[in-house]
């Protein structure tokens, strides 16, 4: 019976037209849940993070089955035979094939789609370029994501530099105060004797501020939870080297594509058989209040999509579902329930 969900937590595999073996899981809700609710298909970020860091979403989605998959070269999925030539178009094609296989192999006919960070941009690209008539899309949740990883990376760099400059000034002031104190000690030149000289060559304030800024950036704008949750720590340690090395995969921008789609004449839109109707697609643009996915990153989506709405998770950064799971769950469940029958 292909309509029966696979055994809970059991790893499945599907084959894409590009010849890639994709690992996926269809997880039942922890409390048994309601089988008549549309499941949530989750797309992980990074790029290159295994989907395992998203597993804490399972109890937060209102008793829905949750579907996770790893792109080629990530997690339990096989790496492409030619990893250096694998790009964003390949990612989109593989993702569309996963959707088709979920319909053909497992009998899934409808779903909500949730994309986190880079995975949100991938989800948008797939909806723009793919055909989803095999599965009805109830809604889209863009979690800490806009229509461009370029703007996301630019905002991360801006915030890091802002923190670094503050740290550089703090370190400079601390060293100046220490130097002034040393000048009061006995010794040649008023700088203290040899016993007061540093035993190791110090980093420059700039170098030291870089290290400090990275820690502060992560603690404020990425994940506030201490210690870092195991699922996130392990996933970050397992980021695919293929994605780290590929500039083709890091830069992903579909903002102009989305603008073009929204501006096309109605008669042209009517020729897109099975394509997602962005004018009516319910979209939740959700991010943490201290997320490096700032208003600048998400505003183009909010401006272009008339059926989009914005949500902010207080006391959270880029991983709001780990930092403030109660508020995350409240907002997402309310949205999903309103659009269950879309």
Image (tube, grey):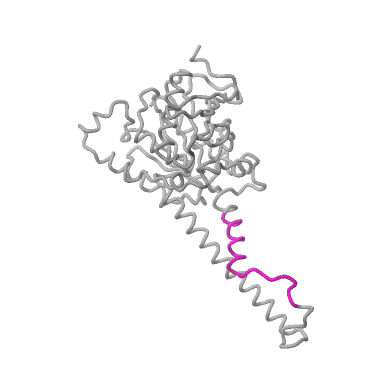
Q: In the orientation shown, which residue stands out farthest toward the bottom? A: 189
Q: Quadrant of the C terminus?
A: top left
Q: Residue at x 55, y 49 (%)?
A: 222
* The magenta stretch spans residue 331: no
* The magenta stretch spans residue 198: yes
Q: Is residue 333 above or below residue 211?
A: above
Q: In the orientation shown, which residue stands out farthest toward the top? A: 1
Q: Is residue 154 above or below residue 2?
A: below
Q: Please provide percent x and percent y for residue 8.
A: 60, 22
For the image shown, how many numbered marks are present on the structure?
0
Which span is picked out in magenta?
197-217
Magenta stretch, overall SS: helix
Q: In the orientation shown, which residue stands out farthest toward the front? A: 82
Q: Please provide percent x and percent y for residue 335.
A: 45, 34
Q: Residue at x 58, y 38 (%)?
A: 53
Q: Please provide percent x and percent y for residue 220.
A: 57, 53
Instruction: Using residue 176 as the reference point, say whether residue 274 is left or right of it.
Output: left
Instruction: Using residue 180 as the reference point, say whether residue 128 is left or right of it.
Output: left
Quick one: 320 or 25, which is closer to the camera?
25
Q: Residue at x 35, y 37 (%)?
A: 307
Q: In the orientation shown, which residue stands out farthest toward the right? A: 195
> Residue 130 lies in what quarter of the image?
top left
């Amino acid at each position: 019976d292909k309509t029966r969900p696979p055994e809970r937590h059991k790893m499945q595999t599907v084959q894409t037209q590009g010849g890639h073996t994709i690992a996926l899981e269809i997880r039942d809700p922890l409390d048994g849940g309601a089988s008549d609710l549309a499941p949530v298909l989750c797309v992980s970020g990074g790029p290159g993070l295994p989907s395992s860091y998203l597993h804490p979403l399972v109890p937060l989605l209102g008793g829905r089955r949750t579907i996770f998959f790893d792109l080629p070269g990530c997690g339990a999925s096989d790496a492409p035979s030619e990893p250096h030539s694998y790009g964003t178009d390949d990612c989109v094609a593989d993702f569309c094939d996963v959707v088709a296989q979920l319909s053909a192999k497992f009998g899934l006919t409808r779903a909500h789609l949730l994309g986190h960070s880079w995975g949100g941009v991938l989800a948008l690209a797939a909806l723009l370029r793919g055909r989803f008539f095999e599965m009805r899309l109830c809604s889209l949740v863009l979690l800490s994501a806009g229509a461009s990883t370029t703007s996301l990376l630019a905002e991360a760099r801006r915030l890091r530099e802002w923190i670094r400059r503050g740290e550089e000034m703090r370190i400079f002031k601390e060293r100046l105060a220490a130097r002034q104190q040393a000048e009061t000690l006995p010794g040649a030149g008023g700088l203290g004797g040899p016993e007061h000289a540093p035993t190791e060559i110090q980093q420059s304030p700039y170098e030291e501020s870089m290290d400090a800024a990275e820690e502060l950036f992560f603690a404020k704008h990425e994940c506030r939870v201490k210690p870092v949750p195991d699922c996130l720590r392990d996933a970050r340690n397992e980021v695919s080297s293929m994605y780290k090395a590929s500039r083709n995969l890091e830069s992903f921008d579909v903002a102009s594509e989305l603008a073009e789609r929204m501006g096309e004449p109605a008669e042209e839109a009517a020729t897109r058989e099975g394509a997602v109707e962005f004018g009516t697609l319910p979209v939740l643009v959700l991010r943490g209040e201290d997320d490096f996915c700032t208003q600048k990153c998400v505003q183009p989506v909010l401006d272009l999509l008339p059926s989009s709405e914005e949500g902010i998770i207080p006391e959270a950064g880029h991983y709001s579902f780990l930092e403030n799971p109660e508020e995350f769950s409240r907002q997402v469940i309310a949205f999903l329930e309103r659009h269950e029958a879309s």
